[in-house]
Image (cartoon, rainbow, N blue to C red):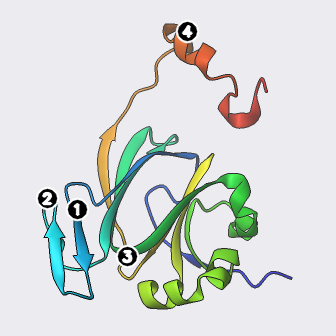
Amino acid sequence: MSDVKIQDWKTPFETGTITLIDTHYNEGVCCEIDHQSGLVYPYDDTPDDDLGVLKARIFHLETESIYEIIFTRVGAYRIVPEQGLLEFNGSGERQTFRANGHMWNRESALCFEWFTGDGFSYVIFSDWNCLEVLCEETPEVRFERKVQGEPIEKFPDLVKANKTPKGGEGA
């Protein structure tokens, strides 16, 4: 019996088909902090604490939209293929939710305690790669733009390079 707990995380792309496009961690912010000596060695901008900013972009098929999600004060995150998150099958049709009690939570209990405030991570469960983030604050979701689909025949090189079509067709 699984002890995984799932909570709501309401987003405009909570249901439907989503794809994780990319992620950027501490973009433009880079430094080394030596806690023993109390010195900071900035490479670029210096953050106000050890915790970073993670930005992720997703594509939501049903609305043909790209969204940016901004996680602040990130203590840890991971990107894993969907097969690595089989414990989350109980999330139903939701593509965004909060989770607790799963394997990463049990393996890294102190991180979940230190970096989340309530022990729950934020999860984006996409069609392939999934993102799980430990942060204290609710992420900000920004609409980036609409994109329009085009006939597949216009992109023969992309079709040839993508030997495993999404949705399980032709595999």
Toward the viewer: 65 or 107? Answer: 107
Decide which of tag 1 and tag 3 comes sooner along the chain.
1
Question: CA gap, disc 4 to disc 3?
Answer: 41 Å
Q: Is residue 79 above or below residue 62?
A: below
Which residue corresponds to mark 3?
A: 138
Mark 4 and mark 1 residues within 8 Å of each other at the beta carbon: no
Which residue corresponds to mark 2?
A: 44
Mark 1 and mark 2 residues within 8 Å of each other at the beta carbon: yes
The residue under the point 61% across, 62% down is: 94
5 sits left or right of 138 in the view = right
Q: Position of residue 66 (x, y in %)?
A: 38, 43
Name the amino acid type tagged 1: Cys
Disc 2, SS: loop
Which residue corresponds to mark 4?
A: 156
Which residue corresponds to mark 1?
A: 30
- The answer to whether residue 1 of the structure is visible from this angle is yes
Mark 4 and mark 3 residues within 8 Å of each other at the beta carbon: no
Name the amino acid type tagged 4: Pro
